[in-house]
Amino acid sequence: MPETVTAPAPVPTTDPRVVRAIDLAWREAELLDRKDYETWIGLYTDDGSYVIPIDPDTDDFAGTLNMVYDDARMRRMRVTRMTEGYAIAAVDAARTVRTVSRFVPESVTDDEVVLRSAQVLIAYKRGRHDIWAADLVHHIRLSPSGDRIVLKVVRLVDSEDAVPAAGFLL
Amino acid sequence: MSHDTTTPAELAAADRVAGRLYTDPEIFEGEISRIFERTWVWVAHESELPGPGTFKSAHVGRQPVIVTRDRKGTLHTLLNRCRHRGASLCEKPKGQANGFTCPYHAWSYGLDGKLRGIPYPEGYEGVIEKGELSLKKLRTESYGGMVFATFHDGIESLEEFLGDAKLWIDRFMKQGGGYPIKVLGKHRFKFRGNWKIQLENTTDGYHFPIVHRSWMASVDAETADMMSFMTDPSAITHALGNGHSVMQMVPGHSDLDADDGTEPLQGRFDHLIKDLAQTLEPAQVRKVVRAMHGTGFNLNLFPNVSMSAAFFRVLRPISVDETEIEHIAIGPDGPPELDAVNRERLRIHEHFQGPFGFGTPDDAEGWDRVQRGAQGAPDMPILVNRGLAREKASPEGWPTSHVTDETGMRAAYGQWKEMMRDA
């Protein structure tokens, strides 16, 4: 008789810890659509990373080329670029509306939630709508002083193909 | 060539070109057949084909090709089209294979394009000769690791075509610090504009401090200072013949072997210098760190590749108003200690070059606007006359002007005119 292994029951999205993580992911989505980058940057921990990889399978972001691989320093410079008014792509950036859904809690502890989700973003600029579809992973650190993002990975379905050069963030 | 009697010479004068060059679909079709299918088009860097059986997908003009390395090490460029019913043989961007089998009826081809097998061959007895049904093969030649292909069997050799650009290819490869160059990764993006807008951009020093102000503000003072070439009289552009040109933004880094040792290494790389110094000779450390931003020039090779400071920029015309670009990150192919160097080079590349970089989206916005603006009065000229009156011949005989001048654009349009009138 083969040994019977019982998989742990999945944590439901109604778990209060998961609810907090989903709230944060949704708040982040809205801030990015509003291009409120100054508030957005405050959602990240100082040791947090924001990554848009090219290789769909890699977790070695340091050793491969990414579209975005931002630590706190790069994130700060990026927000400055997006808000200072000198980057012509940011000044005339597309308007975006994104939907984040299909949440699956990957792991849940009292300190950290790893949350997978799907994001569909429509970007409108000068008579064109571009679609950006991606799988997201958020590592969210839970804390009484405020939940924060430790890692966000945006895996575009077409990450290895040619995408438009963007003046906004995913 | 167009719906009226306008000649290439009238469309592209010495100091101006018609705006219609960006918007007229008939001119675009002429460019595909007379330029992209008649000259040497860059398809690969040899490091992308490191061993027998390795391949990559590419395009020559609009036509899909596979670049392969066979068991003997010879490079081939094969049209990606089965001889039977035209299906594409390979849809992978790169990989390793013994050959290619069409997924439709399983006709199979070797790495050199020879037809090897046909399933159920009885129906073809007396009908076909296998030897006549190899994949269509393009002439393929390489120089300095840069692999080019052409549909035109009768043209000059690649080396003749590159001419004086060869010296600059040699210099560009010195950023390996004595090691060969390898491809580290690539960004791919597209913009809604004509391919020539991008061709011009890599030889356009004039836009740099304006379009890239936000990037300049984000880098350290040493890097910003390095790129402050606007008023530096030693920063110059040469036309090299056959439409090629070189724009020297940082003349002190044009030949990385020319180093008197007085230039301090950038403080931002201190951590790297310390690590490398544990195993590499000081001179070697200096070589690879001094080359961290590549060479101090952009070499524009007509019509589709530039070797720009620390990366390759490859353009692919899609239609009259759509172009795809690859920004290919490169670095030294050396011992494991250099992995840290290449990681740093990846970060530098990400900072400027990607579709979310601090530079490329701003370039792309400028290019989009050129395409949109050029819809107005399409016969009104685009000016390429900056620096015309101060252009002089260099000791080598190359037309030369300041780095912000449009000497490189004039060189490219001169070649465009030659090829477009050459039926």
Image (cartoon, coloured by chain):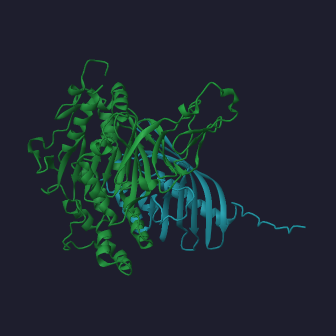
Chain colours: A cyan, B green
Left or right, B36 with reference to A64: left
| Above or below for B411 versus B18 | below
Near-viewer residue (A12 or B283): B283
Residue extending farthest to the bottom is: B278
x and y percentages locating residue B247 in the rendered image: 22, 51
Near-viewer residue (B395 or B116): B116
Q: Quadrant of the N terminus of chain B?
A: top left
Q: Is residue A45 visible?
A: no
Q: Quadrant of residue B88?
A: top right
| Above or below for B418 versus A145 | above
Near-viewer residue (B181 or B23): B181
| Above or below for B320 versus A125 | above
* Count of numbered labels shown in the rendering: 0
Left or right, B293 with reference to A19: left
Left or right, B184 with reference to A144: left
Residue extending farthest to the right is: A1
x and y percentages locating residue A102 in the rendered image: 65, 53
Q: Is residue B375 visible?
A: yes
Residue at position x 24%, y 21% from top?
B6
Q: Quadrant of the C terminus of chain B?
A: top left
Q: Quadrant of residue B388?
A: top left
x and y percentages locating residue B241 in the rendered image: 21, 42
Near-viewer residue (B292 or B161): B161
Residue extending farthest to the top is: B4
Residue at position x 81%, y 67% from top?
A6
x and y percentages locating residue A143 in the rendered image: 57, 73
